[in-house]
Image (cartoon, rainbow, N blue to C red):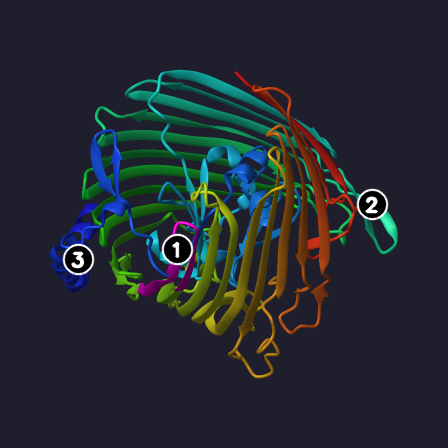
C-alpha cells in the first residue's frame, strides 16, 4: 500500500480522535478575546503579534549562549556532559556516546533538528559524538514529557537543535575557529554569511582530526590508547527568503562524513575495527506569522550510511537509512489562550547487510496543544496519536499547570505540575534482526508526573537581567513492557517485553549573577540530579536485577561552574563534574567507581575581531572510565583562536 493511500485512510481517524479536544479549545477562544492583556502584545515591524504562552508544567531549558560559544569547536556530547544533568555514556573522545536522561535508556532520549527527528530507526538512539556544535545555533533541553511536543518515545526527555534565521540588515561577515590540543587534536570551523533585506545565506564548514593516543593507567601499569583516531568533516548551508514580514522561506542542508577507529577495551591487546559514517539532511520550510495565526510547513529528506569493518576476522557490514518526512503545524494565539495542532508523516526505508530484505516503515501522526491562562494560573494539555504501519499506538499526552505565587518585574515565584502518558514503538532491529528479531513485541508504555518550584530575582534597573535563579523539580516515571534483550536456550539473544522500570528523582538548578564592580562580574551555576531508576519486575525465577539500579545510571550527578568576567575582555572559569558509581552488572555485582573532574579555562578578547581560549580539561589527571574497560583521557590542554572578519 502506498504511503499516500495509507495516510489518506489513517489521517481522518487521527483527526477524529482529536476532534473533541479541538472543539473544547475553540469554544474558549471567544472568552479569551474578552480578556485582552496589552502586556502580552508585541509589535514587530508594523505587525502586531501576541506573545506565546509557555506550555505550563512541561519543563524546558535553553542552554546558555555563552557556553555554546565557548564550546563551539566541540561535539554535542561534550556540551551535554558539562552543561546539563544528562549522563553521557562514552567509549572515549570521538567514539560512541549515548545518553541516560532521568534514569532512562539511550533509546528514551529523542533528538530533533528543526522539528526533524534524528534518532536511528534501526537502533532507536543517537550518537552524540557525531553532532558538531557548529551544526546548531540554539539547543533546547526537553525534560521528560516535554518531548511530547515533538513526538513519542522520550520517556527521559528530548533535545531540540535549532537553526535561527539571520537578521535582515545588509551585512557580510565571517569567522574562522582553529584549535589544537593534546593527543593529536586539531579542529577548524569556517563560518560566513551574506545578509540582505529579503535574502540571507549562511554556511558553516567544520573539520576535526583526533589521534587519541593518550596514556592511561590500569592495574598499576601505564599503557597508551591505540586504534582510536577520528576524522570528521562536513558543512551546514542555510538560505532564508523573507518577501514580507509575515512570510519566511528556509532551505537547510547538513552534510557530513567521518572515519573513526573503534578502540579496543583494556582487556584486548589489539583491534582493527573501524566505522565510516556519511550523513545528509535536507530541510525545506515555510512559515507564516500573523497577528493571531501562525502556520509552518516543512519537508525533509535524510540519508544515513554506515560501514563497519573488522579486518582481523574479515567482517564487513553496511547499512543505509533513507527517510522522507513532512509536517504541517498551525497555531492560534490570543493574550490568554494558545492552540496548536499539526499532522505529520514519516516514511523510512532501511537496507542493511544484517537484514534479509529491505525494510520500510510508515508513521503518520497528529497532535494538539492547548494553553489557557486564567489570572495567575496557566493550564496546558497535549494530545498525540501516532500510527506505525497501520498499528495504532496508545494515545499519549499530558496535562500541566503553572501558578505564580508572586509575579512582579523584580521577582517571581512559581509552582508547576504535570501528569503525562508516553509510549515508544520497538525499533527495526528489535523486530527484524535475523533469528533474534521479535515481531510480537509490544510498544513500551509509561506514565510520568513531576512538580517544580522556581524563583527568579531580577535587577531593578534592568528587569530582563536576572541576579538569581533557583529551581527544584521532583519527577516520577513508570514504564511498562520495557524491551530488554535476553539470552535464550538456543544460545542467541532476543528482545522481550519484560521489565517494569520505575525512575524517580530530584533536579536542583542554581544560577547566581553578581556585579563585583563596574567592570567585574561573577557567575555561578550548579546542577544536581538524583536519579533512582530500578527494575521492579522479575523476568524469570532468580532474577536478581529487581530493586537494583539500572546499569550505567549514576545515582548522583553534579555539575558546577564558576566564571569571572573583567571589562568584557577576560573571562576565566572553573568547571566541576561529579558522577557517582554506576553498576555494570544488572544484579549489582560489579560497578565503576565514582569520579570527580575539574576543568579550567581562560578566554581573552584580544580585540573586537580576535579571541583566544585556553581550556585545560581534567587538570587533576584523574583516571576514570565512563564505560567499563574503555579508558577516558587524563589531563588535556586545548588552545583555540577565533578570528572574525
- Front disc: 3 or 1: 1
Relative image position of residue 511 (x, y in whole percent): 55, 51
Relative image position of residue 202 (x, y in whole percent): 41, 23
Main SS type for the magenta part?
strand
Relative image position of residue 625 (x, y in whole percent): 71, 54
Instruction: Identify the magenta region.
Output: 397-415
Crowd around label 3: few <14 · some 14–19 · many ≥20 (10 Å)? some
Choose between 333 and 311: the one closer to the eye: 333
Residue lying at the far right of the rendered structure: 220
- Is residue 401 covered in magenta? yes
Label for residue 44?
A: none
- Left or right: residue 421 versus residue 524 is left
Separation of marks 3 and 1 at Cα, in angstroms: 21 Å
Crowd around label 2: few <14 · some 14–19 · many ≥20 (10 Å)? few
Relative image position of residue 112 (x, y in whole percent): 41, 46
Choose between 295 and 256: the one closer to the eye: 295
- Front disc: 1 or 2: 1
| Residue 601 against residue 498 in the figure, above or below | above
N-terminal label among 2 and 3 = 3
Q: Which residue is mark 3?
A: 15
Q: Which residue is mark 1?
A: 147
Label for residue 223?
A: 2
- Left or right: residue 323 versus residue 625 is left
For label 1, the SS is helix
- Front disc: 2 or 3: 3
N-terminal label among 1 and 2 = 1
For label 2, the SS is strand
Residue positioned 64% across, 51% down in the render? 560
Crowd around label 1: few <14 · some 14–19 · many ≥20 (10 Å)? many
Amino acid at each position: 500500500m502506498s504511503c499516500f493511500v495509507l495516510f489518506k485512510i489513517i489521517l481522518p481517524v487521527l483527526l477524529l480522535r482529536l476532534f473533541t479536544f479541538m472543539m473544547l479549545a475553540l469554544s474558549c477562544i471567544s472568552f479569551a478575546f474578552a480578556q485582552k492583556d496589552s502586556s502580552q502584545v508585541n509589535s514587530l515591524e508594523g505587525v502586531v503579534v501576541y506573545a506565546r504562552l509557555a506550555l505550563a508544567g512541561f519543563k524546558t531549558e535553553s542552554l546558555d549562549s555563552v557556553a555554546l560559544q565557548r564550546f563551539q569547536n566541540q561535539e554535542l556530547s561534550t556540551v551535554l556532559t558539562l552543561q546539563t544533568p544528562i549522563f553521557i555514556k562514552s567509549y572515549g573522545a570521538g567514539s560512541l556516546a549515548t545518553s541516560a536522561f532521568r534514569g532512562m535508556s539511550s533509546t528514551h532520549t529523542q533528538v530533533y533538528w528543526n522539528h526533524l527527528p534524528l534518532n536511528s530507526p534501526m537502533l532507536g538512539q543517537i550518537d552524540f559524538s557525531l553532532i558538531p556544535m557548529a551544526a546548531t545555533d540554539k539547543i533546547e533541553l526537553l525534560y521528560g514529557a516535554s518531548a511530547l511536543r515533538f513526538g513519542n518515545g522520550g520517556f527521559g526527555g528530548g533535545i531540540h537543535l535549532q537553526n535561527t534565521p539571520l537578521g535582515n540588515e545588509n551585512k557580510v561577515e565571517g569567522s574562522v575557529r582553529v584549535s589544537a590540543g593534546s593527543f593529536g587534536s586539531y579542529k577548524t570551523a569556517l563560518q560566513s554569511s551574506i545578509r540582505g533585506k529579503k535574502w540571507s545565506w549562511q554556511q558553516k564548514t567544520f573539520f576535526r582530526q583526533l589521534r587519541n593516543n593518550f596514556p592511561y593507567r590500569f592495574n598499576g601499569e601505564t599503557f597508551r590508547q591505540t586504534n582510536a583516531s577520528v576524522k570528521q568533516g562536513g558543512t551546514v548551508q542555510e538560505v532564508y527568503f523573507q518577501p514580507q514580514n509575515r512570510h519566511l522561506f528556509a532551505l537547510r542542508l547538513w552534510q557530513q562524513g567521518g572515519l573513526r577507529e573503534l578502540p579496543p577495551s583494556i582487556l584486548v591487546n589489539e583491534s582493527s575495527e573501524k566505522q565510516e559514517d556519511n550523513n545528509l539532511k535536507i530541510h525545506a520550510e515555510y512559515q507564516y506569522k500573523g497577528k493571531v495565526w501562525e502556520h509552518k510547513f516543512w519537508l525533509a529528506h535524510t540519508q544515513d550510511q554506515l560501514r563497519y569493518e573488522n579486518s582481523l576476522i574479515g567482517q564487513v557490514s553496511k547499512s543505509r537509512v533513507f527517510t522522507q518526512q513532512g509536517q504541517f503545524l498551525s497555531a492560534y494565539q490570543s493574550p490568554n489562550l494558545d492552540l496548536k495542532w499539526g499532522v505529520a508523516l514519516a516514511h523510512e526505508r532501511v537496507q542493511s547487510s544484517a537484514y534479509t530484505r529491505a525494510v520500510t516503515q510508515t508513521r503518520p501522526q497528529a497532535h494538539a496543544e492547548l494553553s489557557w491562562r486564567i489570572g495567575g494560573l496557566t493550564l496546558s494539555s497535549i494530545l498525540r496519536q501516532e500510527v506505525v504501519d497501520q498499528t495504532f499506538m496508545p494515545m499519549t499526552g499530558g496535562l500541566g499547570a503553572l501558578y505564580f505565587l508572586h509575579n512582579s518585574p523584580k521577582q517571581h515565584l512559581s509552582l508547576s505540575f504535570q501528569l503525562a502518558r508516553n509510549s515508544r514503538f520497538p525499533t527495526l532491529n528489535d523486530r527484524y534482526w535475523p533469528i533474534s528479531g521479535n515481531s510480537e513485541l509490544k510498544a513500551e508504555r509509561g506514565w510520568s508526573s513531576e512538580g517544580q518550584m522556581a524563583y527568579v530575582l531580577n535587577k531593578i534597573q534592568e528587569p530582563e537581567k536576572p541576579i538569581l535563579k533557583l529551581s527544584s523539580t521532583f519527577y516520577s516515571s513508570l514504564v511498562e513492557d520495557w524491551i530488554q534483550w535476553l539470552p535464550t536456550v538456543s544460545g542467541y539473544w532476543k528482545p522481550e517485553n519484560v521489565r517494569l522500570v520505575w525512575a524517580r528523582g530530584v533536579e536542583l538548578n542554581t544560577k547566581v549573577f553578581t556585579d563585583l564592580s563596574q567592570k567585574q562580574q561573577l557567575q555561578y551555576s550548579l546542577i544536581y540530579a538524583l536519579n533512582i531508576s530500578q527494575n521492579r519486575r522479575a523476568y524469570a525465577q532468580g532474577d536478581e536485577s529487581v530493586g537494583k539500579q539500572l546499569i550505567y545510571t549514576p545515582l548522583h550527578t553534579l555539575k558546577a561552574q564558576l566564571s569571572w568576567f573583567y571589562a568584557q575582555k577576560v573571562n576565566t572559569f572553573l568547571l566541576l563534574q561529579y558522577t557517582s558509581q554506576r553498576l555494570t552488572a544488572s544484579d549489582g555485582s560489579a560497578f565503576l567507581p565514582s569520579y570527580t573532574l575539574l576543568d579550567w579555562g581562560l578566554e581573552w578578547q584580544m580585540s573586537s575581531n580576535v579571541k583566544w581560549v585556553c581550556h585545560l580539561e581534567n587538570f587533576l589527571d584523574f583516571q576514570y572510565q565512563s564505560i567499563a574497560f574503555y579508558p577516558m583521557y587524563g589531563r588535556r590542554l586545548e588552545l583555540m583562536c577565533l578570528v572574525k572578519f
